[in-house]
Image (cartoon, grey):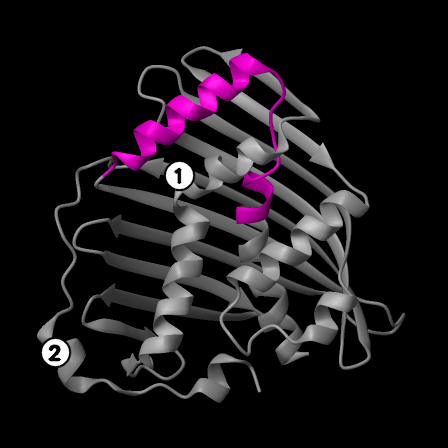
Amino acid sequence: MKKLLVLGSAIFLAAGLTACGTTTSGKDVEDIINSSIAASEDLESFHVKMEMEQDIIPAEEDAEKVTQESTIEMDYVTEPLGLYQTTEMTMMGMPIEAETYFTEEGMYTKDSMSNQWQAAPKEMSNSIVQMSKDQADATEQLKQMKEYIKDVKVDEKDDRYVISFSASGEEYQNLVEEQVEATMPEGLMPKEMLKGLKVNKLDYTYEIDKKTYHPLNFTVNMDFDMEIEGEKVQSVQKMTGSYSKFNEIEDITIPAEVKENAVEMDEAALQGE
């Protein structure tokens, strides 16, 4: 079950990216997306806060549902590349807090269970940070959105454009599998899990500021089945996110005491083995 929780969380994160790549219909909407892409590409920094709720429901009748709740806040700077992230999570009734720095010097992370700063191997840290960047970076999300200009509802609400989307079926299934495989760090996503992954339903809403074309917030509701090591579970998830502090964060530096006290990261522990 521990590995199922880790892998389920990984798909949950990838789902935000996938959902953001599945919207719009009509020329006017494409113009809105193009304007937002241009505005997002000019961003030098931003802050994003994401709140997630996930129920993992085993297929066995006597097995208990597992609920996981997370709040992630991230400062992101494009040049020089830097990321600072805090995570508060409740998993199987246990509260866990984590803190992560990433710059050109590497990635360092600490959680409340070990209370020890750890330095990630370079290849793994690059992969994990790329996944976090794709999850939070509106530019990449909007570029993918252009590939699916259909099955979408677009409304205007006060000072924002609201893009909403609801999907299920094989077409979206293939997209989810591709994105999950592309965004997961190497070794974290077993091939057999993708074979057992079935998307039941997804609802998505994305809001864009009319004046600046900056992203404002998003909501993703997702229901999928998966199987790993012969164990079948259903995952019902909700994720909300909001953006702020556009171009207000100057740079991100790793404190000296973090680098001095860090030990090498246990890769097996990260993969939930």
What residue do we see at 56% from left, 14% from top?
Answer: 27
Of discs 2 and 1, which sits in the foreground? 1
Q: Amino acid at mark 2?
A: Glu
Among the two numbered marks 2 and 1 on one chain, the one whose residue lies closer to the N terminus: 1
Residue count near mark 1 (Cα–Cα under 10 Å), binned few <14, some 14–19, many ≥20: many
Judged left or right of residue 255, residue 108 is: right
User: Which residue is labeled 1 in the image?
Assistant: 139
Magenta stretch in the rendered image: 17-43
Judged left or right of residue 185, residue 63 is: right
Residue count near mark 2 (Cα–Cα under 10 Å), binned few <14, some 14–19, many ≥20: few
Judged left or right of residue 270, residue 202 is: right
The location of residue 28, given as percent across then percent down, is 52, 12
Magenta-drawn stretch, dominant element (helix, strand or loop) = helix
**Between 5 and 154, which is closer to the camera in this rendering?**
154
Q: Is residue 184 magenta?
A: no
Label 2 to label 1, Cα distance in Å?
A: 34 Å
User: Which residue is labeled 2 in the image?
Assistant: 257
The location of residue 54, given as percent across then percent down, is 63, 56
Which quarter of the picture shows residue 112? bottom left
Q: Amino acid at mark 1?
A: Thr
